[in-house]
Amino acid sequence: MNHPWIVYLTAYLSSRVHRARTAPTRGASAVEWVIITAIIAGVALGLATLIKTLVEQQQGEIEQSFGGDGGNGNPEP
């Protein structure tokens, strides 16, 4: 196994593995990014649901203040 390509590949990979093992940890890992993204998505979904509920409640109040006909132009009997 003294083929030049195998010797080169072995040396290259061993240096890369050594650098990866001894490098200082910088930034968040992929798992941490997934957790952070899931939390942000959950908060956004919760806020969207809350806003939708509040808008629908206000819509109902406005419809009732205008006679509750739903805006079809026909007065209630």
Image: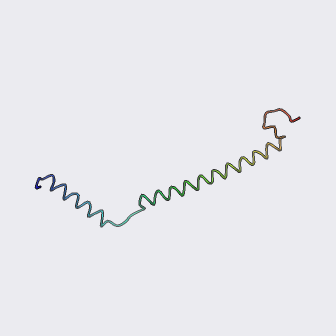
- Which quadrant of the structure image shows residue 74? top right
**Which residue is found at the position 41% from the left and 60% from the top?**
29
Left or right: 6 with respect to 35?
A: left
**Residue 32 image position (x, y, % from top left):** 45, 60
Left or right: 71 with respect to 36?
A: right
**Which residue is found at the position 19% from the left and 57% from the top?**
10
Q: In this orientation, which residue lies closer to the viewer: 41 or 25?
A: 41
Decide: is 52 above or below 73: below
Decide: is 70 above or below 37: above
Q: How is the image coloured?
A: rainbow
**Residue 18 image position (x, y, % from top left):** 26, 64
> Which residue lies most toward the left here?
2
Decide: is 59 above or below 23: above
**Which residue is found at the position 55% from the left and 53% from the top?**
41
In the rendered view of the protein, which quadrant contains the N terminus?
bottom left
Q: How many marks?
A: 0
- Which quadrant of the structure image shows residue 8? bottom left
**Residue 66 image position (x, y, % from top left):** 83, 41
**Which residue is found at the position 26% from the left and 60% from the top?**
16
> Which residue lies most toward the right here?
77
**Residue 53 image position (x, y, % from top left):** 69, 50
In the rendered view of the protein, which quadrant contains the C terminus?
top right
